[in-house]
Amino acid sequence: MITVTEKAIEKARDLIKEENRPADSFIRVGVEGGGCSGLSYKLEFDSVIKEGDKIFEDKGMKIVCDKKSFLYLVGTQLDFSDGLNGKGFEFHNPNATRTCGCGESFAV
């Protein structure tokens, strides 16, 4: 399962409204090769379910992930930080054995 904190849900809903996205939009997370640690996180809003997608719902927010990325993201929590050290969505991934300083890439 992939979960989302209240703060991340609040920010996601705000962004969906600001960007005039469809009301049925959800968070799509994924992984791609690259970044300084080998794998990079992907995060976007989407409203189309694709064949093979894993679908989760946490606190009323739908989170969707492709099957391949899910192998790297199982158990991950998506959070949002607006602190002094930066602003943005953060992945708390228990499968990552190493992460880069910016938190946008990882290794398993």
Image: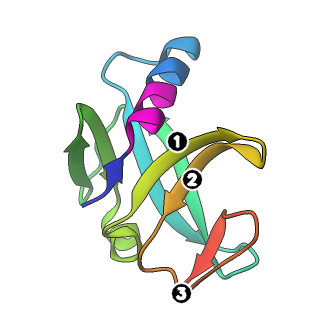
Name the amino acid type tagged 3: Thr
Name the amino acid type tagged 1: Glu
Task: Please give the name of the residue rendered at 39% of the width and 69% of the height, measured from the top-left corner.
Answer: 73
Crowdedness of circle 3 by 10 Å Cα count: few (<14), some, many (20+)?
A: few
Image quarter (top left, top right, bottom left or bottom right) of the N terminus: bottom left
Work out whether residue 89 can be spotted.
yes
Rounded to the nearest angstrom, the CA distance separating label 1 from label 3 is 24 Å
- Which circle marks residue 9 in the picture? none
Q: Is residue 35 magenta?
A: no
Rounded to the nearest angstrom, the CA distance separating label 1 from label 2 is 13 Å
Q: Which residue is mark 1?
A: 44
Work out whether residue 46 can be spotted.
no
Q: Position of residue 19 (x, y in %)?
A: 57, 17
Which badge, 1 or 2, comes first in the chain's sequence? 1
**106 to the left or right of 51:** right
Crowdedness of circle 2 by 10 Å Cα count: few (<14), some, many (20+)?
A: some
Q: Which residue is mark 3?
A: 97
Q: Position of residue 28 (x, y in %)?
A: 42, 46
Q: Position of residue 99 (x, y in %)?
A: 64, 77
Which badge, 2 or 3, comes first in the chain's sequence? 2
**88 to the left or right of 5:** right
Task: Tell me the mark number nearer the camera, choosing from 1 and 3.
Answer: 3
User: What secondary structure is the stretch in magenta mostly built from?
Assistant: helix
- Magenta stretch, residue numbers: 5-12
Q: Which residue is mark 2?
A: 90
Q: Is residue 1 above or below residue 22?
A: below
